């Protein structure tokens, strides 16, 4: 989403920090290093936004950073919409 052509160490560090900061106090107390899988979409959005900000900060972004990177990511991510199946 940032249009970066390469991944820097700073971008990787931003992603790791975003994952770490997504842990709840209870998850940390249990010694977990990854948030619960039920939080995947929220954590993924935080990671993507953090990487976009890092890329822009390092001058690696191929486009201008949006005013709200997290909302930008949420607006662009895939949202599955399935029609209810009713057997004939």
Image (cartoon, rainbow, N blue to C red):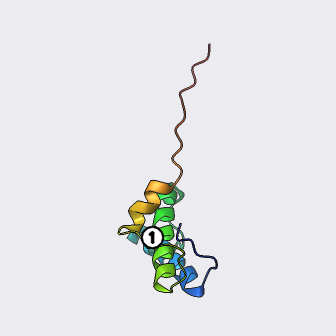
The C terminus, quarter of image = top right
Query: Which residue corresponds to the image point at 36% horizontal and 67% vertical from the top-left?
Result: 68
Q: Nearer the viewer, residue 85 or 65?
A: 65
Among all residues in the image, which is located at the extreme top? Answer: 88
Q: Quadrant of residue 67?
A: bottom left
**Image side of residue 17 versus residue 68, left or right:** right
Q: Residue furthest left?
A: 67
Viewer-nearest residue: 76 or 79: 76
Counting every numbered tag in the picture gives 1
Could you tell me residue 39's position as x and y percent?
A: 48, 58
Q: Position of residue 55 (x, y in %)?
A: 51, 80
Seen from the viewer's position, the closer of residues 28 and 83 is 83
Around disc 1, counting alpha carbons within 10 Å, would you say few (fewer than 14), some (14 to 19), or many (20 or more)?
A: some
Horizontal and vertical percent position of residue 56? 47, 80
- Please provide percent x and percent y for residue 48: 51, 68
Name the residue: 46% across, 84% down: 57
Disc 1 designates what residue? 23
Depth check, front residue: 52 or 24: 52
Return the residue found at the far front: 63
Q: Secondary structure at mark 1?
A: loop
Q: Is residue 21 above or below residue 8?
A: above
Q: Is residue 57 above or below residue 41?
A: below
């Amino acid at each position: 989403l940032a249009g970066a052509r390469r991944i820097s160490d700073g971008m990787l560090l931003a992603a790791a920090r975003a994952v770490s900061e997504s842990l709840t106090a209870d998850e940390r107390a249990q010694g977990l290093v990854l948030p619960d899988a039920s939080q995947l979409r929220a954590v993924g959005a935080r990671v993507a936004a953090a990487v976009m900000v890092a890329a822009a900060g390092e001058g690696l972004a191929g486009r201008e950073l949006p005013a709200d990177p997290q909302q930008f990511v949420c607006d662009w991510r895939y949202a599955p919409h399935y029609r209810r199946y009713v057997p004939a």
